Amino acid sequence: MRIQISHLTNYRYDAPAASVIHMLRLTPRNHDGQYVTRWRIDVSADCRLNQHEDAFGNITHAFTADEVETRDTQGIVRGVVERFPPNFYLRETALTTPDANIAGFAAAGHDAVSLDVLNFLHVMLARLHARVTHHSGGPTTMTAAEAFARRRGDCADFAHIFIAAARSLSIPARYVAGYVRRDDGTAEQGNGHAWAEAFVPELGWVAFDAANGVCATDAHVRVAVGLDSLGAAPLRGTRYGGTGEQVSAKVRVEQAAHQVQG
């Protein structure tokens, strides 16, 4: 499947910021299940985009702009850059710490872990998708425990809950930020997408999209990974001065007109 993506993020300020510093994780890497034919990042500011790799191996761009009103434009996983051993992804964060409720939810299938980790994760995926209602536009930052208690959340919340549950049973899991082509054909999306990956012995990292109740397919475009959404955030930054910051994002994901026939 060939996918075409457009992601536009606008920053506006009531009063001009003295300067802004931003880090972008918006460039996908090639791996066995994903090949990038063309990708470009443009920033409408007088600055240079400096490319490097972060600790997780994500392609990252950083820029600093001074004295401007900022507006910047922007399954089984094999063949990716792995900077850390799987057990590194057992580390808990403030957003993914499992409480007693999440630990109990995960432990409900504990016997299956010793028999078949992959099957257990598939079952947990289905249980989580059935238990929590997908809802966009909630609190900007919510922990896995808070989202699980509310039984509603966005794709990031689903990923955080899945990660917390897996780690509570000593299954390495990590957060993935990217895009997805929707089955209903809706191209205009308010933001990117998020899902989780869990490590299965003798198989490797397997991607689980709990918000949609499926494993990742060729409709998913993997961009960045981290311990949680903060570590894989597509865009993070700070500013000096300025007031009334407003941020808007416009994402378009669609199947490209030209498809390669197998």
Image (cartoon, rainbow, N blue to C red):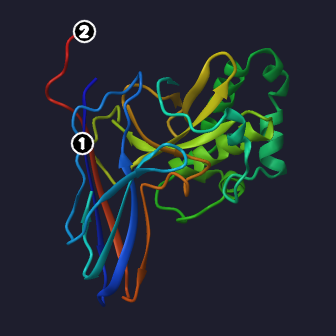
x then y, percent, for residue 47: 24, 69
The one nearer the camera, 89 or 2, is 89
Residue picked out by circle 2: 262
Farthest left residue in view: 258
Q: CA distance from mark 2 to mark 1?
A: 23 Å
- The residue type indicated by label 2 comes to Gly
x then y, percent, for residue 151: 65, 51
For residue 191, say whether it is visible: no
Q: Is the residue 80 above or below the residue 232 in the image? A: above
The one nearer the camera, 64 or 24, is 64
In the rendered image, the quadrant that contains the N terminus is top left
x then y, percent, for residue 209: 52, 35
Residue picked out by circle 1: 39
Q: In the picture provided, is 232 more to the left or to the right than 262?
A: right
Asked which secondary structure carries label 1, the reply is: loop
In the rendered image, the quadrant that contains the C terminus is top left
